[in-house]
Image (cartoon, helix red, strand yellow):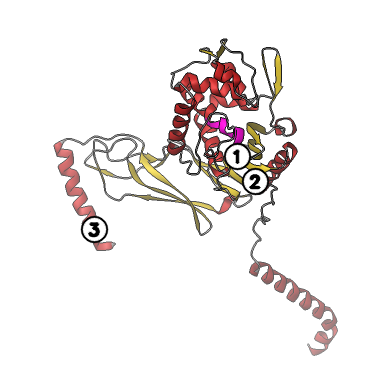
Amino acid sequence: MRVLFRKLRPLLLPAMLLSLVLMTAQALAQAVPTPQTMIPAPPQIAAKSWFLMDANSGRVLVEHNADERLPPASLTKLMTAYLVERELDRGNISMDDMVRVSENAWRTGGSKMFIEVDTEVSIRDLLYGIIIASGNDASVAVAEHLAGGEAPFADLMNQHATRLGLHNTNFTNSTGLPHPEQYSSARDMALLSQYIINDYPEHYAVYAEKYFTYSDIRQPNRNRLLWRDPTVDGLKTGWTTEAGYGLVASAMRDDMRLISVVMGTSSEESRAQETQKLLSYGFRYYETLNLYEQGAVLNTPRIWGGERNELRVGVDENVFMTVPRARNQELGARLDINQDISAPVNQGDRVGTLEVRLGDDIVGEQALVALESIEEGNIFKQLFDQVRRFFSNLIGGWFG
């Protein structure tokens, strides 16, 4: 046996060493965690302030001086257009309504749609003139038509700014022409754009139009990204000497929509390039997932004393979540449903909370609501459920 071992030893030692190396490598592989997606620092932008958010989830991806109050210039017209779209949606005006042009509107300086005094112009043309040609004359004509003048229209603009949660915004006119008390912020402009996109999608296509012709005058949209990036479909540019060059843009790629804002850049080209940096960063390193559909049944908890024994529970709006790319498998959800639900319950009543986690971090919460109304059962059903609930709680107390 010893003789045989001495003969085999030259062959056994390399095999043993190889086995040891493989075992060590396997142990090291198990000890080293799988690397997560690496996300670099956001790009530095040549602007006074900037902001990048997802339009559906509302998650902020990049921000700098986002709440600084700055002159918005023609970004102001986003609110002017929003109020026109709101009135259209409510049926108070129609696209074919005609607006008589006042001398005040006709004389307004700055960028123009070139409407003529004492002529009639349709709401459709005025809306296109505001969004695409950035017409100050069109903005004043709309303000006078909807509110009787610029001052009451500005008051209306500020009321809606408060309603929408634009905390660093104040309007004094419908155009964005310079005024010491007219200001907004990058965050507020992004939030306003989010409402434009989500509240009135049937009108949003106007923001992607590259040209607008009125009275044989063809004007281009000043948003250069509409020509450079096919995924960009809005929203608005602005410029004054005081404000510098600004751009609110939105783009959609693979069902993910981002909204970017730059304010106070140095040129038309700069605002386009800096916006492209923000959008490229957001799309490259993040993705947005639609976790739950509005109205989808997520659970059917017990309901006591009702016509039926189970209540359908879900969310009353789509639940979106924006996460770093390749980390979607780390998403998890927990339903925290009220333990003692009694009839009557009305559709839309809150009955719990949906908690979304990314790894160990809570990244979102959404109300769980009743997806249906359930009335009280008859007296016998209520008495029977009272007895059952008593014993259920009693047993739960013993074992809980």
Q: To which quarter of the image does residue 148 belong?
A: top left
Using a 10 Å C-alpha cutoff, classify the residue at mark 1 as few (fewer than 14 neighbours), some (14 to 19) or many (20 or more).
many
Magenta residue span = 72-79
Label 3 sits on residue: 395
Q: Do the residues labelled 3 and 2 touch (CB within 8 Å)?
A: no
Return the mark for residue 259. Answer: 1
- Compute the Cα span from label 3 to label 2: 52 Å
Q: Do the residues labelled 1 and 3 touch (CB within 8 Å)?
A: no
| 390 left or right, relative to 89 | left
Give x and y (percent) for residue 393.
Answer: 23, 55
Kindly state the secondary structure of the residue where label 1 is placed: strand
Q: Which residue is drawn at 14% across and 37% down?
A: 379
Residue extending farthest to the top is 119
Camera-nearest label, 2 or 1: 1
The answer to whether residue 344 shows anywhere in this view is yes
Amino acid beneath label 1: Ile
Residue extending farthest to the bottom is 2
**Precedes in sequence: disc 3 or disc 2:** 2
| The N terminus sits in image quarter | bottom right
Kindly state the secondary structure of the residue where label 2 is placed: helix
- Specify whether residue 74 is painted magenta: yes
